Image (cartoon, rainbow, N blue to C red):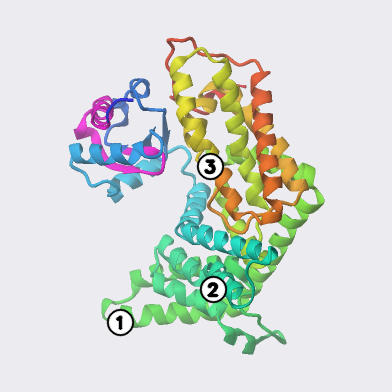
């Protein structure tokens, strides 16, 4: 692979020079560039750079897939050459880019906000989930008990103790309000003193409204706060605005949001658990096969509060293991493509993408291989059904969210780990067989991959 500075300089040249770059950022696998003039970027030429696994346009950004480890180094080098702080966002340029993006519909922007609320909580879900799972394993083996187990159990459940408060703060911030007011509203919905409040002849139950009540109340609180600040005289804004927001939304929480959240949370949890437990074959098949298409459209963000609600109410998430099978199907498809393709560059991309895909980071494999080829993306999704059905039938659940692939075994209760691994192998096999024995158009040995529209091949089928 070319050196980091060579990759960086080549990318800058192909996107129209450093003067054309407004924002430099990166995620786990992609270099994200916001360009002043997107027409100057030559995506086919960028894709031919040694070290680049793929190029897509999304949310008004040119996203260059480089893979873990490489992407942060390239981002820092590009930022140094351009003279832009990596991760620093020009709000005006970003907003214009979002408005131009094809997938930035109001509904998808709303889902993106919901996703952004929970992303900061994922490290805590992972850490606490692993500790909780290990504690239960050690207890079942008779290795820990009493005070030692109680300590591990407490730490493992730590994320849930003040989760509503954290969700409330992030919700308020995401919807343009004050985080502390959001946290206070969430505190109202979580307070033990709720048991002393009688509504319609019944005492309220603390936290019964769940995370859904917090999301609704804090979003409305943030919207109300913004509207009040626009009309409130500056001299009394600090004193009057938060008081009115807390009073109005606080009373509304007791009479409206708490019972509404309770109804939605209880029924949503019941619906998901019943759908999986009663319709295991169908639910496992549909969820595993449709998850990656949901990821492509951004609709997968709607599942995050559902998973959090499941963990909050039952301590287990039946969705996560099924959804993880989608990525496993992509791994199987990648292996099949590697064995059949004559394109050396494609083999190199697969070779570097497969290990990280097995660890739960499937973007390089999906955007760099299966999507551009078209049919292999579909066969990968269909092949994942074998794993999805198996883990659904075996009632495999996780104790947290945030991990996928093989690392998810750390969040699977000990008695179900073997079933999760069997399901993963079945998804590998399903993706491999469906892709290997399906006729798809291979690339000639000297043909470069094109990424103008990664959905175009799928839409044509």
**Image point 62% across, 38% down: which residue?**
326
How many numbered circles does the render carry? 3
Label 3, residues with CA under 10 Å away: few <14, some 14-19, many ≥20: many
Q: Which mark is residue 161?
A: 2
Tell me how far mark 1 sits from mark 3, CA to CA: 51 Å
- Which residues make up the magenta segment? 4-33
Along the line of sight, the residue nearer the viewer: 171 or 158: 158
The earlier-in-sequence mark between 2 and 3 is 2
Residue 20 covered by magenta stretch = yes
Say above or below: 345 vs 193. Answer: above
Q: Secondary structure at mark 3?
A: loop
Say above or below: 399 vs 182. Answer: above
Residue 270 covered by magenta stretch = no
Q: Which label lies toward us, 1 or 3? A: 3
The earlier-in-sequence mark between 1 and 3 is 1
Q: Secondary structure at mark 2?
A: helix
**Image point 76% across, 52% down: which residue?**
275
Residue 217 shows up from this direction: no
């Amino acid at each position: 692979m070319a050196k980091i500075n060579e990759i960086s300089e080549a990318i800058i040249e192909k996107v129209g020079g450093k003067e054309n770059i407004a924002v430099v950022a990166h995620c786990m696998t992609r270099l994200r560039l916001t360009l002043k003039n997107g027409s100057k970027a030559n995506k086919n030429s960028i894709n031919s750079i040694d070290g680049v696994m793929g190029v897509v346009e999304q949310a008004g950004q040119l996203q260059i897939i480089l893979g873990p480890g490489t992407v942060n180094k390239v981002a820092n080098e590009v930022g140094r050459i351009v003279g832009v702080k990596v991760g620093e966002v020009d709000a005006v340029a970003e907003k214009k880019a979002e408005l131009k993006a094809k997938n930035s519909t109001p509904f998808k922007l709303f889902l993106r906000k919901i996703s952004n609320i929970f992303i900061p909580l994922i490290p805590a879900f992972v850490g606490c989930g692993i500790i909780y799972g290990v504690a239960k394993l050690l207890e079942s083996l008779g290795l820990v008990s009493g005070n030692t187990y109680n300590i591990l159990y407490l730490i493992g459940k730590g994320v849930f103790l003040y989760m509503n408060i954290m969700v409330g703060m992030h919700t308020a911030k995401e919807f343009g309000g004050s985080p502390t007011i959001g946290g206070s509203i969430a505190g109202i919905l979580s307070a033990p003193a709720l048991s002393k409040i009688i509504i319609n002849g019944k005492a309220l139950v603390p936290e019964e409204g769940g995370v859904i009540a917090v999301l609704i109340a804090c979003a409305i609180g943030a919207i109300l706060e913004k509207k009040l600040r626009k009309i409130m005289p500056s001299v009394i804004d600090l004193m009057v605005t938060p008081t009115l927001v807390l009073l109005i939304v606080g009373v509304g929480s007791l009479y409206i949001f708490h019972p509404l959240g309770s109804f939605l949370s209880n029924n949503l949890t019941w619906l998901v658990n019943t759908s999986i437990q009663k319709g295991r074959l169908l639910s496992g098949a549909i969820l595993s096969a449709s998850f990656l298409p949901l990821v492509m459209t951004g609709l997968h963000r709607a599942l995050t509060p559902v998973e959090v609600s499941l963990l909050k109410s039952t301590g287990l998430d039946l969705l996560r293991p099924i959804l993880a099978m989608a990525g496993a199907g992509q791994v199987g498809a990648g292996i099949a493509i590697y064995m059949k393709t004559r394109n050396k560059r494609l083999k190199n991309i697969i070779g570097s993408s497969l290990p990280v895909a097995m660890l739960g980071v499937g973007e390089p494999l999906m955007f760099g291989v299966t999507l551009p080829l078209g049919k292999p993306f579909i066969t990968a999704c269909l092949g994942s059904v074998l794993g999805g059905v198996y883990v659904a039938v075996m009632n495999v659940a996780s104790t947290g969210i945030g991990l996928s692939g093989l690392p998810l075994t750390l969040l699977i209760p000990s008695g179900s780990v073997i079933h999760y691994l069997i399901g993963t192998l079945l998804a590998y096999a399903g993706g491999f067989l469906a892709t290997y024995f399906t006729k798809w158009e291979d690339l000639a040995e000297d043909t470069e991959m094109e990424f103008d529209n990664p959905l175009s091949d799928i839409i044509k089928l």
